[in-house]
Amino acid sequence: MPEAIFRMRDVSKVYHVGDLEVVALRDVSLELYRGEFVVLLGPSGSGKSTLLNLLGGLDTPTKGQVDYLDHDLSEGGDEKLTAFRREHVGFVFQFYNLIPSLTAAENVALVTDIAEKPMDPREALALVELTDRADHFPAQLSGGEQQRVAIARAVAKRPDVLLCDEPTGALDVETGRLVLQVLERVNRELGTITAVITHNASIAAMGDRVLRMSSGRIVSIAANEKRLPASELVW
Amino acid sequence: MRIGALDLKILRDAWHIRGQIVACALVVAGGINSFVSLSSVNRTLAASQAAFYEEYRFADVFAGAVRAPESVAASLAAIPGVATLETRVAVRVNLDVPGLAEPARGRILSISRDPSGGLNALHLRRGRLPAPESQDEVVVAEAFSVANSLGPGDTIRGVIHGKYKALRIVGVAISPEFIYALGPGQLVPDNRRYGVLWMDRKGLAKAHDMEGAFNDVTARVGPGASVRAVLKEMDRILAPYGGVGAYDREDQLSHRFLSDEITQNRTMARITPTIFLLVGAFLLYTILTRLVQMQRSQVGLLKAFGYTGGEISLHYLKLALVISLFGAAIGVATGLPFAYAMLRLYSEYYYFPMYGNDQGLNVASAGVALAVAAAALGAVPAAMRAARLAPADTMRPEPPPRFHAGVLERWGLRRALSPAGRMLVRNLARRPLRFAASVAGIAIAVALLVMMTAMMDGVRYLMDWQFTIVQRDDVQVLLNEPRTKSALDEIRALPGVTEVEPFRLAPARVHAGHRMKRGVLFGLDPGPTLRRVVGADGRAWEIPPDGVVLTAIVAGTLRVEAGDTVEIEIMEGKRSRLPLLVMGVVDEPIGFATYVSRATANRLLGEGDVVTGAYMRVDSRERERIFAQLKAMPEVAGANLREAAYTQFRAMIDRSVGIMITVNLVFAWIIACGLVYNGARIALSERGYELATLRVLGFTQRESASLLLGEQAVITGTGLPMGVVLGIGLTLYFIWMLSTQMWRMPYVVTGLNLVGAMVAVALAAVASGGAVGWRLRRLDLVGALKARE
């Protein structure tokens, strides 16, 4: 049995939207293991993003316990969570979230400058095969290229976990597949725990495990006997 | 009335960006406040001056003589161009004011016999005019009455023509001739020790031995007539009667001071509001441009519904209108009381009826119009942008803004900068005009403070100079007529008098070619210590035995320099006119004296060893006694106390300095806060998404705040030193503008001025930046990642 890096026990999250109480997560328990590739599937509002936010230290649970190794993430505290994100987490977003005023290499350097044992920004860009686009500004890159820069930025600090929220959501099939191949490669070569949120059920085949969520609960956890290479995914 | 949905939207938009709206409205308010207060003060002063002059028939020309028979009046009145002419009797008087140890001086003028009041008519404030042919009833000037708490029923003693006389006060009045009453040898009005009085002509003539004669003339000149020609002709006619030179309003002290004040005030009333309203227009432009950008999709939606470009423009213009009207309301509401306070302050130094209560409304409406115009200047370009947006484009998210590495980076700045530093530089470089305007705004805030403190320090310096470096006496004694030097022996012999330095003073004109400057000829004994001639470099001048030393103001007017020859025309006695070599030009900041040795003055005047007064140093324990004795001497026309004048002046300055510093500090703060707060808020709005990303990537609050506020810090940091440069320039401009024919404003910009101004503005910037930085805590990290705006 591989080592459990993340442990969630009986976690609930309740948001207050105006006078409404929205229960985003209900008594969720989950463990994530070293080196695994997890795909989270579920419709809008099922709680996928909330789960990811809790794992990434962007938010704290209303009830329950979230641990990363010996770090308690449920207590919160802005400084503690910021330090956690800085040292351990890489984020990839649906809309890339690149800084428009920085070139590809500089966007990566933004993170390597504050990380402890980062790779060279060029090395990270080489990993996503964008060495020749290093000095381009976001406005000069295609959507797929921008997302690959975002992945390079996320992995350059050698994070322990890579959290991806709909990384292919804004991309066409070809480009999306290319981005997934990069994620697959990072997971394989760096051994980074990778969690990918998606609407797209076809992506499930590339994960070690597939979590299905609905109405704030994990309704099923399935392990894939054999992971399908991203290059063979079709949707 | 039902508010349309679109109007409701703009109201809610306004509420959403209320901080920025308030900041912008306050800048507009500053502009309107300064416009309303300065303009209404200016209009009131100018209107009151004009009305008072007209209603009370202030003369255009003035002349004096030793004694001229009344028959000469007819030939004076016949001078072409003279419309009305009046002869008067004017008498210098020593006054013994109850409760005042030292002698006071006064001038008694005869009241016109014209039933309508004649020229320079009196405006009675209290009491009545002296009874016809009364020999002891006087009307006193209000300034003197207030300073000495004297009024109808009180009696003061005066020495007229060497004889003691009790003068009964029957009325208190003001006159267009003495709105600002400056006694001889005074730099600031000392209404306690100098007063103007009026008596019946017959009574005064009898007391002064002037029956059937006159020694003073005033006249009004008809429209289109040449004042110059009239002056020349008057001089010619009065010369045989000891004429001391005719002059026009330009050289009439009261008129000159009041007019200079009004001119300076008018300049301020133009410059200050302009600065504010330009900054306000810029802020409005940035706020609305950002709002339109944020509401692209809403604009598209409205267009898709069928709203026209014009309607959408109008929609945003309404917001600008609301902001400017809000600012204008604050500006008017604070400006009008401020104007009244300023007018009250003026009324303590300028005695005339303040008309123009109706100015308030006019100025307020002009202010509102100005605020709307400034709003239009800033808002129209932004509104046009909204009108031009194509609906289909607005439905798509805005493409990422284009950036590029600028010139500085290509020169190697790139390597020196962290990625965060590059973000900052590129964001600023992407909008060079916005950057330049923001820097200019900060610079203006600093410059305003530098200029204002420099002016205040300049006035102080001027007076410190006059009262501690030039004058080091305790008392300046003026004799009522030229006397031989031995007349001072009696004064010198008084117990407690330690030093006496005689001087010979005479009114004079200095000519150089066709140029002429009125002033005084100041004859000093060699090696003066109590009243020195000191140049701007601090060097005390020795007055050469021959030749003349001119002050820079006189030399500048005449366009002469050392080595040139000028002609000195003495305006008393035989009115001799003699050429003298200019031995030097002394850069004295105050006054327009022409210095000669006393021996030269005596020679020019064709007299012996004669003096007209002396500077004295006295033992402070004996002061009171010495004053009492001076008062009793018939030959003493009065005494000026250096200490008293200095104190009086300091009190006046300290009070106005307090007000000016507060007002300008508030103005500078409003500008700096408005610029920095708005700049940071807009940066936060434009890049909230970016900052949230950085926070998610592991940047701390402090790191992301420094990125957000770094730009404002660069703007402020660039603006501060530029403000110092601009402030020095502005100071030099004001020095040039404010330098009058009587004194020259010195350039006093100290390190404290500069550092103080920068610190004050920097504090405002830090406070407003901090207020925005605080908002970063509330940044919604999760939300910012979900969707592009």
Image (tube, rainbow, N blue to C red):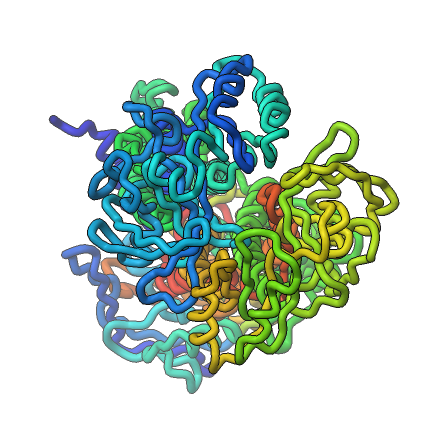
Nearer the observer, B429 or B676: B676
Quadrant where the N terminus of chain B sits is top left
Determine the residue located farthest toward the left in the rendered image: B1
Residue B308 locus on image (x, y percent) = 35, 18
Quadrant where the C terminus of chain B sits is top left
Q: Number of labelled discs?
A: 0
- Which residue appears at 83% of the width and 52% of the height? B546
Residue A62 locus on image (x, y percent) = 24, 72
A7 relative to B60, above or below = below
Is residue B767 in view?
no
A12 relative to A203, above or below = below
Residue B302 locus on image (x, y percent) = 32, 26
Residue A86 locus on image (x, y percent) = 52, 72
Determine the residue located farthest toward the bottom in the rendered image: A70
- Which residue appears at 35% of the width and 23% of the height? B303
Nearer the observer, B197 or A62: B197
Nearer the observer, A25 or B118: B118
